Image (tube, rainbow, N blue to C red):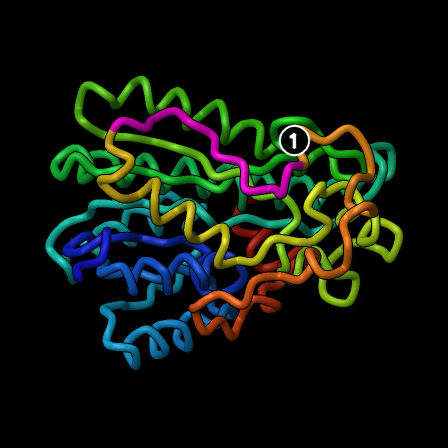
Amino acid sequence: MKGRLENKVAIVTGGGSGIGEAISKKFAREGAAVVVVGLDSDPVRAVVDEILAEGGRAIGYLADIALEEAAESCVKAAVKEFGKLDILVNNAGAFPATSTIDKYPLEAFEYMIKNNIYSNFMMTKAAIPHLQKTRGNIVSAGSEAGHMGEPQNTPYGGTKGFIHAFQRGVAVEQAKFGVRSNIVGPGPIDTAWTHKETGPMDAKMEKMTTQGVPMGRRGTPEEVANVYAFLASDEASFVTGAIYFVDGGVTVSKGPHGDEVPSSLKKEPTGELELKHSKEGNTSVRKEALASMQ
């Protein structure tokens, strides 16, 4: 049986860890040739090797795609290697700090503007001419925080709110060229970002994160990747300008309903993908990356 992305070519930014790893491997399993994009310190090479070992097609691309020249070069590399571009996944992003707004570090805010907004804009701008040729599509990482706002994390929600509005505008603007654009809005997912040991959350915020999920648990990277695969496929041919929340019910919740879920239902599904880098990905401000914006 052919995969739903057979003969498609996809770029996945932030594709070396967390949700990005799951997207890269899911797309490869569904038949796509994948360009796994990340920074030098990301496990991009490992993810590419793991895809190739399963018989998939993939190459890595290491660059800071928040910079216009790097974004353009990334798209050119994909077209040169695989002959075309069908799918752009704007997954790259940063979540470097949590704090009330009066104490929020300016460098963390600037870092998110660069990695969450600039990267999405630059890659979209570079990819559109090629997506018009293939009647391709864009799927971008939004967030339930971009829809509702999020205490202790207000600037992050603001950057995701930009992506929601920006990509919905792209959807309308590019529809006449046959190009679709959609957004996936994850809630709390089981990656480095939502654990106090590996991300900016403290113990209290980590606990509140799952309390606010009606399903009583974090989602898995694979559960998010499954939605990306649908939206990127021809099965979603009449879906554009949509925001698909993969949040266990957070956006419709009105309290800490997660506490009411029995422990037997809080267990995360095992999934099919062999994910090795879900808890990787630097959540702190990378000075060298921030300096490139100056």
Position above or below: 293 against 206: above
Question: Which residue bears the numbered disc 1?
Answer: 251
Q: Residues within 10 Å of mark 1 (few under 14, many from 20)?
A: some
Q: Residue at x 58, y 59 (%)?
A: 288
Image quarter in which the C terminus is found: top right
The outermost residue toward the bottom is 53
Residue 138 spot, x, y in % from top left: 33, 38
Counting labels gives 1
Asked which quadrant contains residue 231, the reply is top left
Residue 122 spot, x, y in % from top left: 38, 39
Instruction: Assess whether residue 243 is covered by the magenta stretch.
Output: yes
Q: Residue at x 87, y 57 (%)?
A: 203
Residue 33 spot, x, y in % from top left: 22, 61
Asked which quadrant contains residue 18, the reply is bottom right
Position above or below: 113 against 57: above
Region in magenta: 238-249
Q: Residue at x 72, y 43 (%)?
A: 213
In the displayed structure image, the side of residue 124 where residue 284 appears, left or right: right
Instruction: Assess whether residue 62 is covered by the magenta stretch.
Output: no
Residue 106 spot, x, y in % from top left: 74, 40
Circle 1: residue type: Thr
Q: Residue at x 47, y 30 (%)?
A: 243
In the displayed structure image, the side of residue 164 where residue 37 appears, left or right: left
From the viewer's side, name the closer residue of 143 and 234. 234
